Each structure stands twice: as C-alpha cells, then as structure tokens.
Image (spheres, grey):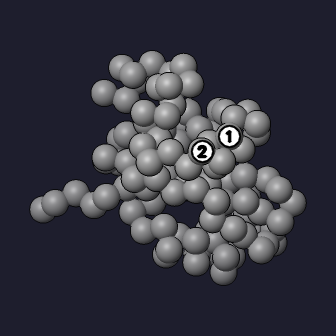
Amino acid sequence: MTESSWYLYLIRAQNGALYTGITTDVSRRLMQHTSGKGAKALRGKGPLILVYQGLVKDRGTALKAEYRVKRLSKQQKERLIMIQPLCITTYLVTIGFSETFFT
C-alpha cells in the first residue's frame, strides 16, 4: 500500500483570519470547509479563499509543519502566502526552525 501525498494549506476567511490545516486532498477539504462540514473555526466565516497549498512528503512531516505554521505570527503567515514556497519545510528552516525537527 502506497502512502498518499499530504498537503499543508492556508485558507483566508472573510474577516481576514487565516486557518492552517493538512489533508491528502485540498479540493475536497476546501469543499468541506465551504459547506460547513469542516473545522468549526471556519463555519459561518465565508467566503473562504484558499491562499496557499504546499506538498509535504508524509503525514508526520505535515503534522510537524502544521504545528510550526500555526505558531507563526500573522505577518509571517502573510509573507509565506506572498512567497508561495514550493517546499514548506525548507521555507520553515530558512526562517529559523531547526531542520532536525522535520526528520
């Protein structure tokens, strides 16, 4: 059995708040959030806009990256969105997080 690809994503709510999550299917997850069946934090906060998605090598790395991104300041998250890094883990290392955290 092959492991699915994992993605870290950020969604912007109508009020400007940013939500960070992980999934194996970004389109499906965005549809769940939009229909009110996703995270409670996003219910009633639409329209929702997907502002970033990045491929992560596996579930464990996705969970670690999500943990780090959720702790970034709003300004740091906005910069991440502006840069749109292809590899979120490399980006997190370049802004100061330990590379060993992701191994």
Mark 2 crowdedness (10 Å alpha carbons): few <14, some 14-19, many ≥20: few
Looking at the rendered structure, the kind of residue marked 1 is Arg
Residue at x 83%, y 56% (from the top left corner) = 16
In this rendered view, identify the residue nearer to me: 86 or 34. 86
Mark 1 crowdedness (10 Å alpha carbons): few <14, some 14-19, many ≥20: few
Looking at the rendered structure, the kind of residue marked 2 is Ile
Residue at x 69%, y 35% (from the top left corner) = 76
67 with respect to 87 (left or right): right
Residue at x 46%, y 52% (from the top left corner) = 54
Q: Which mark is residue 79?
A: 1
Residue 62 is at least partly visible in this image: no
How far apart marks 1 and 2 lie (CA) works out to 6 Å
Quadrant of the rendering where the C terminus is positioned? top left
User: Element type at marker 1?
Assistant: helix
Using the image, determine if residue 9 lies above or below residue 31.
above
Residue at the bottom extreme, as displayed: 35
Residue at x 51%, y 31% (from the top left corner) = 92
Quadrant of the rendering where the N terminus is positioned? bottom left
70 with respect to 9 (left or right): right
76 with respect to 54 (left or right): right
- The reply to whether the C-beta atoms of the residues labelled 1 and 2 are less than 8 Å apart is yes
33 with respect to 66 (left or right): right
Across and down, in percent, residue 70 comes to 63, 39
Residue at the front extreme, as displayed: 83
Across and down, in percent, residue 91 comes to 49, 34
User: Element type at marker 2?
Assistant: helix
Residue annotated with mark 2: 83
